[in-house]
Amino acid sequence: MKTTTTSFSNPDCLIIGAGIFGLWAARHAIKRGESVQVVEKAHVGNGASGGFLGSLMPHEPVRWNEKKQMQFEALDCLSNCIAKLEEDTGFDCGYRRCGRIMPLRHEKMDFHVKERLEGMKTLWQGRYSLAKYNQIGEDIIHDGKLVGLPKGWVNTEIAAYGVTYDNFSARVNPRSYLEALAAYVRAHAEINEGVEVSAIDAKNCKANLADGTSISAGRIIVANGYQAYDLLSQIDARYKTQTILGQGVKGQAVLVEYNHNDTLPIVYDDGVYIVPHAGNRVAIGSTSNKIWSGEKEFDENDMSFYQRGITAVPALKDAPIIEKWAGVRPRNVIPEPLTGKVLSASISGRLDDYETIYAAIGGFKIGMGIAHMDNLQP
Ligand SMILES: Cc1cc2nc3c(=O)[nH]c(=O)nc-3n(C[C@H](O)[C@H](O)[C@H](O)COP(=O)(O)OP(=O)(O)OC[C@H]3O[C@@H](n4cnc5c(N)ncnc54)[C@H](O)[C@@H]3O)c2cc1C
């Protein structure tokens, strides 16, 4: 087998995949002083990270567990991590702690809201707030400022029992965020696009490439999204049936043009996220399909999420759709020890039994808000 000739022919750290997890892994490794090479089969943002929804929503502060605590810590430090990245690169990632409104459609929500209001006091450590408003017309306060809602930003009919508002939820522009990370990595290391890894030789810490060449490295971080399951199960058949197992779940979203002054909160209703972005853009999404074909093909027959979106936010009814996007996100299958319920947490760390092979695989619908956590120290 030939050996590939890139400027780092034997990097300390080889990263497979230039999505949000791979690029954060690269930034951390660079900062630790490792020589880094990222190989990406297509281009930066080719996978699930390259969309436009970018909602960063905390788990509800009830039935707390390790995963929720980890996400709390991640979202809590994200604004600082992004500010540092922006300072390093001069890029704007489109981050804003915009808050979130959830309409209360049913009377029975009252019990859950009380639980959340109670849980928030301790679990959010007094750093963020969640409040219930009986009517949309009431003044919603975010960090001491009044949140001005244009007519139709929340459908009063579906908010029959009021709304909750939290000031913890945020949004980021996924593409700008990736661009900033890629700029940082390119300035200090190498991203090789159009380079596909076909197999990992774990014993020799080597990535075999689709073109027949290979790259040896001090360690390898597998961060190629849902396709990591295949790559890892080739290393060790146990991963097919034990701890590392997952599935690609396809999702879609649309981006609309709507004039706003970028002070609006996210609306979350009926499983749909309505996320305001800078530049008069609002993203609406997303779906979750376990059975799918065509990784990036947008299915026009699967638009009910959009209808639900404009029902929740009627102001968007006539907003022109300017982009439709589909992607496949990794959903790791990690059964909760007590209940057996599947958790969609991220997988991040060194593989048991393999000294030099690490995995960093996204956390289903919350990947954008946790990818910056550094769990991959050599
Ligand atoms: C429609 C949709 C909406 C979403 N909305 C949100 C949201 O609002 N908030 C949120 O937090 N999360 C959201 N997510 C989830 C989030 O996007 C993912 O959790 C995250 O992007 C996963 O990142 P990743 O780096 O693990 O994978 P990816 O972004 O998929 O990156 C993997 C990369 O590896 C490359 N690759 C694959 N195989 C190989 C190989 N063999 N060799 C080299 N390179 C390879 C791919 O081309 C790709 O670029 C959404 C996902 C979808 C699909």
Image (cartoon, rainbow, N blue to C red):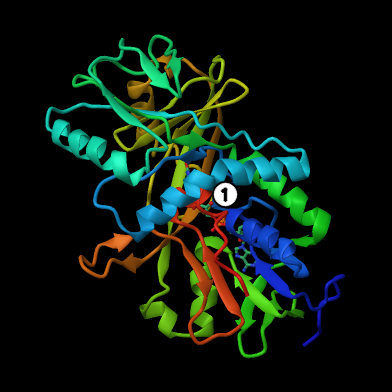
From the top left corner, tell me how far across and down residue 51 is, in percent.
56, 42
Mark 1 nearby-residue class (10 Å; few <14, some 14–19, many ≥20) = many
Name the amino acid type tagged 1: Ser
Residue situated in front as seen by the camera: 188 or 51: 188
Can I make out residue 366 in this image?
Answer: yes
Can I make out residue 18 in this image?
Answer: no
Residue in the picture at 55% in, 45% down: 78
Left or right of residue 195, residue 280 in this image? left
Q: Which residue is mark 1?
A: 49
From the top left corner, tell me how far across and down residue 337 is, in percent.
26, 70
Quadrant that contains the N terminus: bottom right
The image quadrant where one finds ligand 1 is bottom right
Residue situated in front as seen by the camera: 114 or 358: 114
Quadrant that contains the C terminus: bottom right
Residue in the picture at 58% in, 85% down: 355
In this picture, is 80 found above or below 352? above
From the top left corner, tell me how far across and down residue 331 is, in percent.
42, 59
Residue in the picture at 76% in, 51% down: 184
